[in-house]
Amino acid sequence: MTGTQRFVASRTLAGLDLVRVDDRPVLEDHERLRGLLGRHGGAALAALFAEPVVSRSNGTAPARVDWYTALDGPIRPLAELTSGEARRVQERLRAALAALEPLLRGPDGPLPAASLNLASPQAVMAVGEAPLLIDWGLLPRGLAADENGRLRHAAATLGADWPVPPVGREDWAARFARPATPEPEVASPPLPHGPPRRTFTGVPTPIPAPVAACAIAALLVGLSYIPGVLAFPRPPEAVSPEAGALRTAWLEGLRQRHATLTTADGFDCPRLRIALPGLVPQSPAGVRLPADAAAPPEARAAVEAPAGQGGPGSPAAPAPNGLVDRLERSTVLVIAGDATGSGFFVAEDLVVTNRHVVESAIAGASELRIAGRHAGIVPATLVRVGEPGTLTDFALLRVARGTGGRPLSLAPPGRPLTPVVGSGFPGLYLGTDPTFARLREGDATASRDLVPVLQTGVVNHLQRYDEAAVTLVLHGAEIAPGNSGGPLVDYCGRVVGVNTFGRTDDRLPVTARYALGADGLAAFLAASGAATALDSRACDLQAAPRPAVAAAEVEPAAPAPARSAPRSGRDVRPAAPAPAR
């Protein structure tokens, strides 16, 4: 490494190919690259490429590259900048690339040109407002042989107005080793026979306006037949049989949905809930979960134990084996000095949270504790933390056995529109919670009244990051600072993600909520010696039947008129008997 360097990011090389020039990865020629850039454009241009430090594979973990820079200023991805900041960084990047072009076309061009291959659009970073390239000299696996794929990839990383970076010396010669300016034309020798060439001098004869207009019209008509400048729209492309079948099935699904909703309009509320459960999703409060027959032996006692009772004045305990009860037994408040976050049990003595929640404890500046309704307040110790970075923001804590915490199983992130529940202790809510106020004042018994805040939503989108082997789960369950480290579970009580961060738009009142997928968590736990298998079975929301509804509740005593006055929305139920006195 050269000079005083600052850590930027870390990437595994799994799923990536090293770009080579003369059978040598360009990643290993950073010193020569830096020298070429410095001699051509000075220190500012030389600092455009982050310095790589490669760790070779040991047969178990894949090879990894850590990126460093000597630039000063906050290090941020472009996605975290305001639109104005991002625009200025991109303008400086375009200026740097323009300054690079003469070097790329010269005899030393293969190395810097091939280095412009970037693993992903996230490879463009900002240090202050200076552009920085990481993950350079890398391409997604197999892309080097896909010309069209490389064209799209280059447009997504460097922009469509920049040539496709080469993947070898021969490729460079075909793309860049051409003169930057056209060679002067050589005058043709005079013909040996025929009439002498006429030379026109003086003022040219003006062309009549009608003739000029006709010539221009003819030129435009001729241009319209050149591909890419058609003056007329292209004819519609033929629809393939597969696409036609999909379109037909989609339209048929819409028709069936319309028919179902039309039928539902004639039902009263009890009939609607029984006959059309798909239109009235089951509430998490009413979900009953099956017993965990496959629970590990060390966790079975906690799984099968009856729900504990709260202290005096505590809320009524939820029904055993319900989703609410399971989340109250598994979710805990994580306390690291003055910082708080959320966590959850994955074994009788192991709690998962985010690395950034326990950052002060990592530095040795604070002690760790967890608090929960069934766990009380107990000390915790760090077992393992993930590498610094958004996609590896995991931490594993150990507590004493017998705390009463209930481990949660893991499941792959669900498909979009899968119902989910976020569980945790957001500071926005704790600020008005008298239980938390007692806890902060040193009342240890207050932990028995501490219950997590539950928020419902659905999975909105999945973003897979192969280099970190983790899926980002975007979801609609409300989270806020303090939810970090808490579980995002499906209605079967399985963790599909760890709530980690949110992003807001400074132009619109929109918040995107992110959880690190259970796939990344499972890999982190396996590396920590606490391997937990993912339960890939489908979650059946109707696994537990609802209480039976009496026939009188389903059908009214007398038939209702065909289309009477609008209903009030109340359920049609028989009159309740008067209470005994």
Image (cartoon, helix red, strand yellow):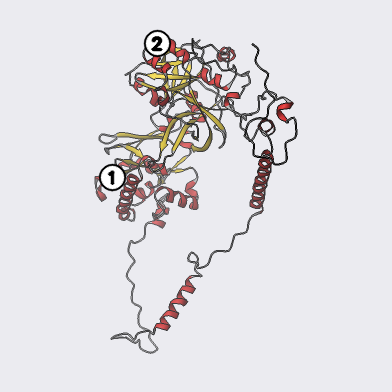
- The residue wearing badge 1 is 46
- Decide which of tag 1 and tag 2 comes sooner along the chain: 1
Decide: is 275 above or below 343.
below
| Res 302 → quadrant | top right
Q: Which residue is mark 2?
A: 443
| Quadrant (top left, top right, bottom left, bottom right) of the C terminus | top right
Please, what secondary structure does the residue beneath circle 2 have? loop
Residue 525 in the image, given as x and y percentages of width and height: 49, 23
Q: Residue drawn 44% across and 26% down? A: 483
Q: Nearer the viewer, residue 159 or 62?
A: 159
**Residue nearest the observer in this picture, 212 or 536:** 212
Residue 22 seen anywhere in this rendered image of the structure: no
Residue 209's x, y, as percent? 39, 83
Q: Give the residue furthest to the right.
A: 558
Q: Amino acid at mark 1?
A: Ala
Residue 569 position within the rendered picture, expressed as x and y whole percent measured from the top left: 62, 34
The count of marks equals 2
Disc 1 versus disc 2: distance between alpha carbons? 58 Å
Amino acid type, callout 2: Asp
Mark 2: few, some, or many residues within 10 Å (few <14, many ≥20)?
few
Q: Nearer the viewer, mark 1 or mark 2?
A: 2
| Crowd band around label 1 with a 10 angstrom C-alpha radius: few (<14), some (14–19), many (20+) | some
Asked if labels 2 and 1 touch by Cβ distance under 8 angstroms, the answer is: no
Does 97 sit above or below residue 18? below
Counting from the top left corner in percent of width and height, residue 192 is at 38, 86
Q: Taking 298 as reference, is 340 left or right?
A: left
Residue at (33% x, 61% y) in the render: 180
- 252, 525: nearer the viewer: 252
